[in-house]
Amino acid sequence: MEELEFESGLGNEKKVMLTIFWVNRKAARTEGCAPFLIKRIVTGDKTYVPEGTHLLKINDDIMADMVSTLDAGKPVDMDFNIGNENIEVTLKNGAFSVSAEKSTEIEEEIIEKLEIEMPKKFPSLCDSFKPRVTPLEK
């Protein structure tokens, strides 16, 4: 498990998206173009998992719950799968930890990137990423 303490002026929604983006990006480097799946999100009050054959997407309600949990100073836990790799993440105000089942190299790369991006006023976040992890707008 790798851990990072950081200072950031970013809002909690941006921190969540930045975290998910870089977990995906760094895991894809070793796991290729395998689907990136959100397996579980645990906030202060709820646990979100995929329903049936549907993928878990971060809708407005889930994001609001994640943000309010972080605003309250509580951690948000997230579990991801990409290819053969399972990754567990905990995000708190000012702290982040990541544990990859197979590759500690992925852990180190995620930490290194978030260490650079979290303090930035305008961090690197691909515009095409958000639609991949959020439901389509109607």
Image (cartoon, rainbow, N blue to C red):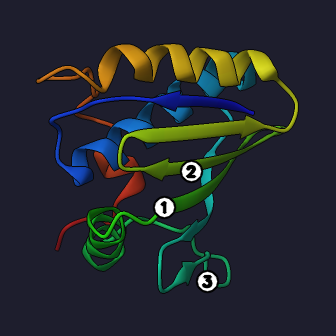
Compare residues 31 and 65 and report the one nearer the observer.
65
Residue at 26 percent of width and 20 percent of height: 124
Q: Where is residue 138 in the image (x, y as percent from the top left)?
A: 16, 74
Provide residue 98's location: percent of width, then percent of height: 64, 37
Disc 2 secondary structure class: strand
**Front residue (pair 92, 120):** 92
- Taking the spot 22% from the left edge, 23% from the top edge, the residue there is 123
Residue kind at label 1, given as amino acid type? Pro
Residue 40: percent from the left, percent from the top?
62, 67
Task: Name the residue that disc number 2 marks.
Answer: 90
Dot 2 crowding, Cα within 10 Å, few <14, some 14–19, many 20+: some
Q: Distance from label 3 to label 1 (Cα)? A: 23 Å
Of the two numbered discs 3 and 2 on the same chain, state the one appearing first in sequence: 3
Q: In this view, does 111 lie to the left or right of 83?
A: left
- In which quarter of the view is residue 3 placed? top right
Ranked by sequence position, the earlier of labels 1 and 2 is 1
Nearer the camera: disc 3 or disc 1? 1
Alpha carbon of mark 1 to alpha carbon of mark 2: how far?
6 Å
Q: Mark 1 points at which residue?
A: 75
> What amino acid type should be assigned to the residue bearing mark 2?
Thr
Question: What residue is rendered at 36% in x and 71% in y?
Answer: 69
Quarter of the figure that contains the N terminus: top right
Q: Crowdedness of circle 3 by 10 Å Cα count: few (<14), some, many (20+)?
A: few
30 horizontally vs 3: left or right: right
| Disc 1 and disc 2 in contact, CB within 8 angstroms | yes
Q: Please give the residue where the numbered disc 3 appears in the rendered image.
A: 51
- Using the numbered discs, state the Cα–Cα distance from disc 3 to disc 2 in whole angstroms: 22 Å
Q: Judge left or right: residue 22 versus residue 87.
A: left
Tag 3 and tag 1, C-beta contact below 8 Å: no
Element on which disc 3 rests? loop
The three-letter code of the residue at mark 3 reads Glu
